[in-house]
Image (cartoon, grey):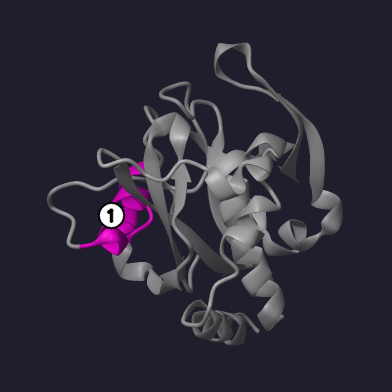
Amino acid sequence: MFDKITSDLEGELANALPGVAAQSRMSSYSRQMRIESYPSPPADVRVAGVLAMFYPKHEEIFLTLMLRTQRGPHSGQVSFPGGGVEAQDADIIATALREAQEEVGIQPEEVMVLGKLTPLYIPVSNSLVHPVVAYSQRVPNYEIDPEEVQHVIEAPLSTLRDAATIKRTDMTVSEGLTLKDTPYYDINGHVVWGATAMILSELLELVERVI
């Protein structure tokens, strides 16, 4: 089952992607209302890559997420492993693999890349995020960077696909701004919202095509 899903997913990633429509389903109300006029990435945008990696464990499929430490504009939030492009990176895939190794100890040689999702611009950090979808045949031997990561979250695909996992709440962000009725994924008690939820939304739409 795992091999078939990853193979079929690779095929879907090579076709037309769900794109902004899928992303926006898990975005805040304010972003949804401004989707047509939402800011385009400026010239000084920070380009970043994140790794969305599946792996089998105990006859279930899991996706690697992590809880960030209290640093930076996305402090204390759940995210995919990833970060900004550096000079030594050959491409955005190399960025995602390097960051995943540095942050949670995923070894690049154990990762098979399937493709990329739609890039997502995040104004709060002025980042253009390129999600790289991949899989590993083995459970990662996680080793976290304690300066960047509080702990790894092993998210079961069955939980992610469960409609009851999607909930809504008011989110208080920087400078006391409240985003009303914002959708999020409740993953084992962790609130997964914002850019990570938007990326997940597009990824899960592709998963539903192949399961």
State the residue in front, 173 or 88. 173
Q: Is residue 194 left or right of residue 186?
A: left
Where is residue 144 shown, x and y percent of the image?
41, 40
Q: Which residue is at a point 76% across and 57% down the rendered structure image? A: 159
Neighbour class for label 1 at 10 Å: few (<14), some, many (≥20)?
Answer: many
Q: Circle 1 sits in a helix, a strand or a loop, which is it?
A: helix
State the residue in front, 68 or 55. 68
In the rendered structure, does residue 1 fall within the stretch colored magenta?
Answer: no
Q: Which residue is at a point 38% across and 47% down the rendered structure image? A: 128
Where is residue 96 shown, x and y percent of the image?
34, 55
Instruction: Tell me if residue 163 comes above or below residue 145 in the rendering.
Output: below
Span shown in magenta:
91-107
Q: Is residue 187 visible in this depiction of the protein?
A: no
The kind of secondary structure the magenta stretch mainly shows is helix
In which image quadrant can residue 28 be found?
top right
Q: Is residue 19 visible in this depiction of the protein?
A: yes
In the rendered structure, does residue 98 fall within the stretch colored magenta?
Answer: yes
Q: Which residue is at a point 45% across and 26% down the rendered structure image? A: 73
Q: Which residue is at a point 61% across and 81% down the rendered structure image? A: 5
Where is residue 42 shown, x and y percent of the image?
32, 40
The residue at the far left in this view is 88
In which image quadrant can residue 195 be found?
top right
User: At label 1, which amino acid type do we have?
Assistant: Thr
What residue would you read off at disc 1? Answer: 95
Instruction: Tell me if residue 185 comes above or below residue 133 in the rendering.
Output: above
Task: Tell me the quarter of the image containing the C terminus.
Answer: bottom right
